Amino acid sequence: MQILLAGPRGFCAGVNMAIESLDLALAVYGTPIYVYHEIVHNRWVVENFRKRGVVFVNNLCEVPEGSYLLYSAHGVSPEIRRVSAQRGLLAIDATCPLVTKVHREAIRFAEEGYTIVLIGHEGHDEVIGTLGEAPGSIVLVGNSQDVDRLEVPDPNKVAYLTQTTLSVDDAAVIIGRLRQRFPSIVGPPKDDICYATQNRQEAVRQLARISDVALVVGSQNSSNSQRLAELAAASGIPAYLVDGPSDIDLAWFAGNETVMVTAGASAPESLVQGCVDLLQTRFGATVESVVTRTEEVHFVLPKELRVERAARRRAELTTTEES
């Protein structure tokens, strides 16, 4: 067996920022820390934080007044921010900046009088937050059939936005259909689908051509992980989405395949290595890293936590100097 270890894979800058934010909040404020929805869509990450005293909630009524509340990487609507303030919650915003970018675009288009077509998955945390920015101006579509059913007040005043974790290919098909129906449609200055989603999909697209099986590490509720598995399967090879090595069925392999291993943007590298170790132990697999693109993106922590971290570092330096 040969393993082709895709690069880039795993954590993106937004996920790194959100997880680092929650880690620091725990260190500074102690427990309990509340998080609105899952910090990222990964079962292992969520369970690990839960064991450390983090409480994940889907309703702000579950958060005692005056508590610390962290917004997940997927973002929240203005209504959630309003209710948080009303309840006196001490909010820390760990929304991915690329999601915030989509929110700002929604506000701008709405203020300019556009009907906004949001391409995304109904019920996804990110989509719910974006819809909340301009609920009277946004309509959600998930496929070309939805586009065909669209009725808008002014066909010459239509804009589109996309969920950041979509399949690039699927989004392109829907955008193409939108352009056919609404030739005057406008979009964001830059693609909304995030750099990490695009890079991981491109790596899968390239490696699937020379692989017999694809193993994608990520949780079932992770949109970008699902898209990686779908993309691999669409190339004609078996593709399996697993949370980690315990989900792998060794019957999937004969032992002489080329296996592509990748991970969604919210999957920890430790789980990837666990899967690789299992295949090496069972099948004597060799491993080759194949890097299709290098990522050097970094997002800063929320302002509140940057201040706390700076204060802790100053205290540590003072203690060191005194000793």
Image (cartoon, rainbow, N blue to C red):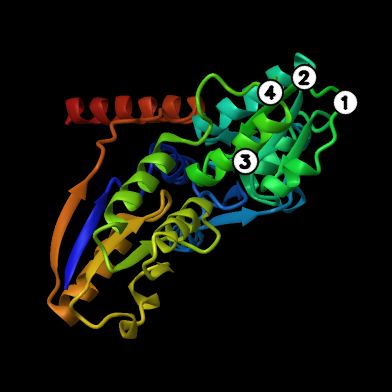
Label 1 crowd (10 A; few <14 / some 14-19 / many >=20): few
Q: Are marks 2 and 1 in contact (CB under 8 Å)?
A: yes
Residue 210 placement, left or right of 22: left
Residue 258 placement, left or right of 154: left
Q: Earlier in the sequence, mark 3 or mark 1?
A: 1
For mark 2, what is the residue?
157
For mark 4, what is the residue?
185
User: Which secondary structure, mark 2?
Assistant: loop
Residue shown at 73% from the left, 41% from the top = 147
* Residue 220 horizontal/vertical position (percent): 52, 64
Rendered position, 23 above or below 44: above
Q: Earlier in the sequence, mark 4 or mark 1?
A: 1
Rendered position, 75 above or below 43: above
For mark 1, what is the residue?
153
Q: CA distance from mark 4 to mark 3?
A: 13 Å
Residue type at the position of mark 3: Ile
User: Which secondary structure, mark 1?
Assistant: loop
Quadrant in which the C terminus is drawn: top left
